[in-house]
Image (cartoon, grey):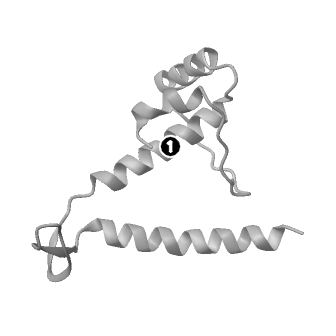
Amino acid sequence: MKLKELIAAWEETASERRTPYEYRVRLPIHDAAKLHALAEMYPGRSEQDLLTDILSAALDEIEAGFPYVQGHRVVAEDEQGDPIHEDTGLTPRFQELTRRHLAELRRQLEEREP
């Protein structure tokens, strides 16, 4: 989700499975004021919900912003039959690390559930 799509999402209710962990942050005062303003504008959302949504959207945008680095290996062909080369930039490493951590977090969640 892009940051611009958050406002529309805040108009709806959406919930995703959460980790049992809490991540604490200390915001710069100006950012804290913005967060409180958003909480006042969207009273159905807590500051924690807003931060969770903002962080999720920012992480998606960071991933989308990793530059594509063309590798030597052809992994597919496009509609015109032109080769599509593997991405040897940061994206594949980030995705692999994300999958590894996701599997571990899911395993930990399953261990906690009865």
Residue 38 showing in the rendered view = yes
Estimate the x, y position of residue 90 in percent, counting from the top left: 29, 66
Decide if residue 28 is in sight here. Answer: no
Q: Amino acid at mark 1?
A: Leu
Task: Name the quadrant of the C terminus.
Answer: bottom right
Location of residue 102 in the rendering, given as x and y in whole percent from the top left corner: 57, 68
Residue 94 x/y as whole percent: 38, 67
Residue drawn at (50%, 27%), measured in percent from left and top?
A: 7
* Quarter of image, res 11: top right
**Badge 1 is on which residue?**
55
Along the line of sight, the residue nearer the viewer: 31 or 53: 53
> What is the x, y in percent for residue 43?
68, 19
Q: Pick the residue in front: 110 or 37.
A: 110
Mark 1: secondary structure: helix
Point 70% across, 56% down: residue? 21
Q: Is residue 27 above or below residue 33?
A: below
Q: Residue at x 67, y 28 (%)?
A: 45
* Vertical arrangement, residue 106 with respect to residue 30, above or below: below
Q: Is residue 73 left or right of residue 9?
A: left
Query: In the picture, residue 74 is in which quadrant?
Result: bottom left
User: Would residue 37 appear left or right of 20 to someone viewing this image?
Assistant: left
